[in-house]
Amino acid sequence: MEDYTKFKLKKTDELTALLEHKDDLYVISCNKCFKEFEAETEPECAEFCGFLKEQRKNLTGSTQVDFLCNRPMTEKKLETAIPAQAKNVCVISCGLGIQTVAEISKLPVYAASDSVCFEGRHGMALTKRRCDGCGQCYLNLTGGICPIVDCSKSLVNGQCGGSKDFKCEVDKEKDCAWDKIYERLAAQNRLDFLRTGEIQLRDHSKVNFKIINDYVKSVREKRLVGFYGGLHPTESKEFAEHLPLQAFPTPSTVVIPLSQHAGAPAVPLVAVGDAVKVGQKIGDAAGFISATVHSSVSGTVAAIEDRKHPNTGLKTLSIVINSDGKNEVHESVKPVADWTKLSVDEIVELVKEKGIVGMGGAGFPTSVKLKSPKPVDTVLLNGCECEPLLTADHRVMLEYADDIIFGLNVLLKTIGAEKGIIVIEDNKQDAISVLESKVAQIPNIEICVAHVKYPQGAEKMLIKRALGRQVPSGGLPLDVGVVVSNVSTVKAVSDAIQTGMPLVERVLTVTGEKINKPGNYIVKIGTSVKEIVDFCGGTTDADTTLKLGGPMMGFEVTDQNVPVIKATNGIIAIEPEVSEPNPCIRCGRCADVCPMELLPLYYPIYAGAENVDGLKEKAVRDCMECGCCEFICSSKIPLRTSIKYGKKVLAESEAK
């Protein structure tokens, strides 16, 4: 494989002249991009540090950074890295990385390397500064501001004299590059260095960077809007977003797993042969993080046995109920006469007893969120539904807006929060209009309209987008005074109070280019996936991938004889992926789109080697498995599989 090395160390005589009269040096080196990935670090940093020792220079420290030109991540890494005793910074990278460090650092920055010119990619980050790969780096002379790419005329001997009010005569919207160079060098007391330095004339036969700059400029703003990284995949919501909710026919048999939530499985409360009714509790929560389970039909318990779980594919204890078709409601299902008279503890207990969990996919028990050990000032409702294809929450917002607001008010009282914010992406203008009109006269509830971006609905991204708050690594929304809930979840809270009905049914979308009749359905928990797919006309052909959930985070189904559970928000039939994985080439795309600002390229290496220290160092547990890295990976590496395995390796090592 060709190694697209972007830089090489300057020659020894150049480095000697460069560092004359300079000391107390700190070295920053970039791990090269666009090459076959190896976990080992690049050799240039050690080689240069050895050279400094030979020159009897005081080396204050060094660091190696992946994708140095990725400014947000580099800024975070260098925030505390450079020691106070350092007086100069030497950078080993292509011009992109050198310019990035020069903008971040208050110290003088010097290029210890030259960019290598070649016909191929050059740098991965969508930064404001570009590198032409001209092989004759001027950044030492110009304070880290590149005259080749920042000056409209690519002048290397000073400004042309046409500058007016510090603006370029060629592009009046652009600052004069040479004015900026003089300003930076004056601040670093280096103007003498500029006047005495030797400047070679540039080879103007090199390809101009502006060929790619127009594209970079067009996507840069979208990349950082709201939060770092993320994607804009094709939405494909047109299949089902216009289709109103329908009640799915009552199935003849339901299979209700006792594990439909995060935490411990529920404990069965019924026996084979028992008669049950709709809303009757058939499984009790087995701990603080657990959830009760209720019958979604009336009928007879036919079996209590292990059945395949729809998400994991593993066997899990389930209650099988044969429906009598009557849908008789259990006597415990009664509305609350006046919920405002309930105490906080009574509301929490009611939500727990009704088996309500997060319905956005995670299935975390809602009662646990309501019992916050820390002060909370804001409740965020996730109405983004940022996964492609899915439209269930969209329809819930359109058809149950009053119930959503009712449920949000319950959460605000229970948690003691001052404000409620419903966040909706701007591809759902009809839902935005409906909810804005509903909350217009409610002072403590507002609608936040967010520009479409995946994975905006993830808790930490939603908080950053709506409130500008950063949940710390390993932290929870509670750490920044926020509770996040899904719009369908608060609708379930509303049902529990206004009708007394537990969580026994949910809205889901059946959609995708391979489904014959898309739709949005209110489905009883425990209904067979196969029964739903058949009702929707089946798939267009046998060559289909079926997933529960969205295309990004959904669970692939190979056996349709599995039930819908509380966290199932969609059934999608899509084109199968046929690409075989190739070796990682360190293109940096996974790091560029990771909303958690991680380096996913390391996970297959460290997980495969069961390198516990490496997995910890690269914070694999901070990964929320959104799938952005896998979606963008040019080598089609199954990164999420490696991430899941890496987390398992960590858990097993800590259990020993």
Image (spheres, grey):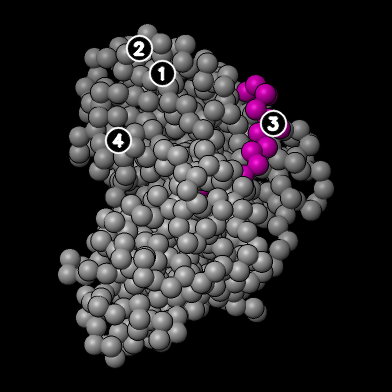
Question: Looking at the image, do the residues carrying marks 3 and 1 touch, with CB atoms under 8 Å apart?
Answer: no
Q: Nearer the viewer, mark 1 or mark 4?
A: 4
Identity of the residue drawn at 21% across and 70% down: 86
Q: Which residue is mark 2?
A: 442
Q: Which residue is mark 1?
A: 405
Report the side of 98 relative to 483 (left or right). Answer: right
Q: Which residue is mark 3?
A: 238
Q: Nearer the viewer, mark 2 or mark 1?
A: 2
Residue range corresponding to the magenta coloring:
230-246
Q: In the rendered structure, which disc, 2 or 1, sits on the residue that comes first in sequence?
A: 1
Looking at the picture, which amino acid does disc 1 mark? Ile
Q: Nearer the viewer, mark 3 or mark 1?
A: 3
Report the side of 485 relative to 542 (left or right). Answer: left
Label 4 packing within 10 angstroms: few (<14), some (14-19), many (20+)? many
Residue 549 percent across, percent down from the top left = 58, 43
Q: In the rendered structure, which disc, 2 or 3, sits on the residue that comes first in sequence?
A: 3
Quadrant of the rendered structure where residue 144 is?
A: bottom left
Q: In the rendered structure, which disc, 1 or 4, sits on the residue that comes first in sequence?
A: 1
Picture quarter with the C terminus: bottom left
Label 2 packing within 10 angstroms: few (<14), some (14-19), many (20+)? few
Q: In the rendered structure, which disc, 2 or 4, sits on the residue that comes first in sequence?
A: 2
- In the rendered structure, find residue 482 and report the number of the disc placed on it: 4
